[in-house]
Amino acid sequence: MNRIFSGVQPTGNLHLGNYLGAIRNWVGLQAEYDCIYCIVDLHAITVWQNPAELRAQTREVAAAFLAAGIDGRKHIIFNQSRVPGHAQLAWICNCVARLGWLNRMTQFKEKAGKDRENASVGLYAYPNLMAADILLYKATHVPVGEDQKQHLELARDIAQKFNADFGVELFPLPEPLIFGPATRVMSLRDGTKKMSKSDASDYSRINMTDDADAVALKIRKAKTDPQPLPGPECLGPDGKVAPEAMAARPEAFNLLGIYAALADKDLNTVIGEFAGKEFSVFKQVLTDLAVATLGKIGGEMKRLMADPAEIDAILKDGAERARAKSAPILAEVEEAVGFLRV
Ligand code: TRP
């Protein structure tokens, strides 16, 4: 069976964007793949993390996985630092990857900003650790967002160079799984900005921990415009929403996109359904759907986080199974490299 590996940083305030863009897709992959979902705490500390918050956020992400429907007993959910093989293989990846490769990584440039001299060495080597995550399990497929495509490309380069340098066919080249366009969720207060955990206004986002009342209130307050909802006239010749139409009514298309994603429908179908209707009517339907899906997840997350024993047990068990799966692969790598192991 093909194997999925994916990672998510233990950031707090998981919101609808995280759910629709990543977690929900991961739930769906469980039927077809052997899935390993990792909370990447080693990646998190490439920038400063408050230790108590890091621990709490690790649990929050685990709760979100479980509440959304990831089966942590059948598949694997764990936090990265618990399996030392990630750091061990990352070192080997550090020695395979070239400075020139890392110098091309656009995310490092963004994250390091102007004061590059003051960025951690870990932030620079971050993509090598990500490669190690994937290769440690010989994962064949990696669901990633657009922003991680370049890092996945690097993981493929590292796998290829390792195989070539040591004359082995040890690592399969991991394939990206990129999910559809419905995943760009924008702020509920400003349809031109991405929904973000760091927006000052909590009304800008639907948090995964929001209960039914909070979800309903935020949708009611979500920014709209004075016209009725757009219809098929907004579609360009390619059958997609025309860029000018999108730019003119970002909030309307954001809400339509959210509805389409939650309902698992095509955006064009949804546009056809609500063409010419008033926002008040559409918002009611959207609220009902959002409450039905997200309200349940939020409630379950709260229950799990109130008593972390269940989460902690699943992460511990996941880590043990991850260690068992990765140990023979790490041994093979060390053998190929020439580390004395007898
Ligand atoms: N870098 C990824 C992100 O920030 C998280 C990540 C770490 C990851 N290791 C991974 C994703 C391995 C896919 C595979 O989103």
Image (spheres, rainbow, N blue to C red):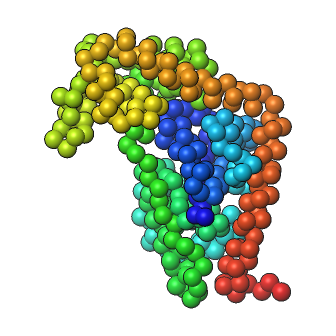
x and y percentages locating residue 68 in the rendered image: 62, 36
Mark yes or no: residue 140 visible.
yes
Left or right: where does residue 225 sit relative to residue 158?
left
Left or right: where does residue 112 sit relative to residue 30?
left
x and y percentages locating residue 229 in the rendered image: 28, 19
x and y percentages locating residue 173 in the rendered image: 51, 71
User: Is the N terminus in the top left, top right, bottom left or bottom right quadrant?
Assistant: bottom right
Rendered position, 157 above or below 18? below
Q: Quadrant of residue 93?
A: bottom right
Q: Quadrant of residue 291?
A: top right
Mark yes or no: residue 250 visible.
no
Residue at 60% x, 79% y is 170
User: Is the C terminus in the top left, top right, bottom left or bottom right quadrant?
Assistant: bottom right
Rendered position, 28 above or below 309? below
Left or right: where does residue 322 sit relative to residue 35?
right
Foreground pick, 135 / 202: 135
Q: Quadrant of residue 232?
A: top left
Foreground pick, 1 / 190: 1
x and y percentages locating residue 64 in the rendered image: 65, 37
